[in-house]
């Protein structure tokens, strides 16, 4: 059996038709809505060109905020 390899554009169109993400189609995530949040995608685009150190600082801060939010949720 021959393996099919669609182009990126074909994968994007298929994901759009199925109302999911390319990552979900590729099995990279089980959460099909994860990569469809436009606000988060804009944030990722904003930081993609930052230095490694700047990205590390952003991730450190984000991790702390997530940890804090989870703690509040757990004790609510």
Image (cartoon, rainbow, N blue to C red):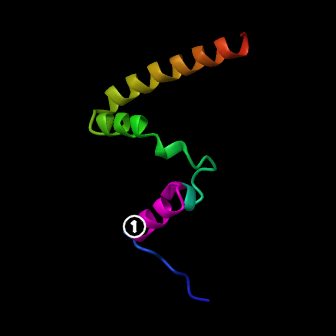
Residue picked out by circle 1: 8
Q: Helix or strand or loop: what does disc 1 sit on?
A: helix
Q: Quadrant of the image for the N terminus?
A: bottom right
Comparing 61 with 52, the one in front is 61
Q: Residues within 10 Å of mark 1 (few under 14, many from 20)?
A: few
Viewer-proximal residue among 33 and 58? 33
On screen, residue 62 versus residue 30, left or right, reads left
Magenta-highlighted residues? 10-23
Quarter where residue 57 is shown: top left
In this picture, is 55 found above or below 76? below
Identify the residue shown where x is 28% and y is 33%: 50
Left or right of residue 40, residue 51 in this image: left
The spot of residue 47 in percent (x, y) is 32, 34
x 33%, y 33%: residue: 52
Q: Looking at the image, is 44 positioned above or below residue 74?
A: below
Residue at image coords 65%, 11%: 72
- Compared across the picture, whether 73 is left or right of 22 comes to right
44 vs 21, nearest the viewer:
21
Prevalent SS, magenta region: helix
Name the residue at 53% across, 55% down: 20
Q: Is residue 26 above or below residue 30?
A: below
Tell me which corner region of the image, top left, top right, bottom left or bottom right, holds residue 55: top left
Residue 37 place in picture, x, y as percent: 46, 40
- Give the vertical position of 31 relative to 43 (above or below): below
Residue sitting nearer the eye, 24 or 33: 33
List the single residue furthest toward the right.
75
């Amino acid at each position: 059996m021959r393996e099919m390899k669609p182009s990126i554009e074909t994968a994007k169109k298929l994901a759009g038709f199925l109302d999911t993400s390319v990552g979900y189609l590729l099995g990279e995530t089980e959460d099909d809505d994860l990569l469809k949040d436009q606000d988060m995608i804009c944030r990722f685009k904003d930081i993609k060109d930052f230095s490694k150190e700047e990205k590390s600082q952003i991730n450190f801060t984000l991790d702390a905020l997530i940890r804090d939010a989870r703690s509040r949720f757990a004790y609510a």
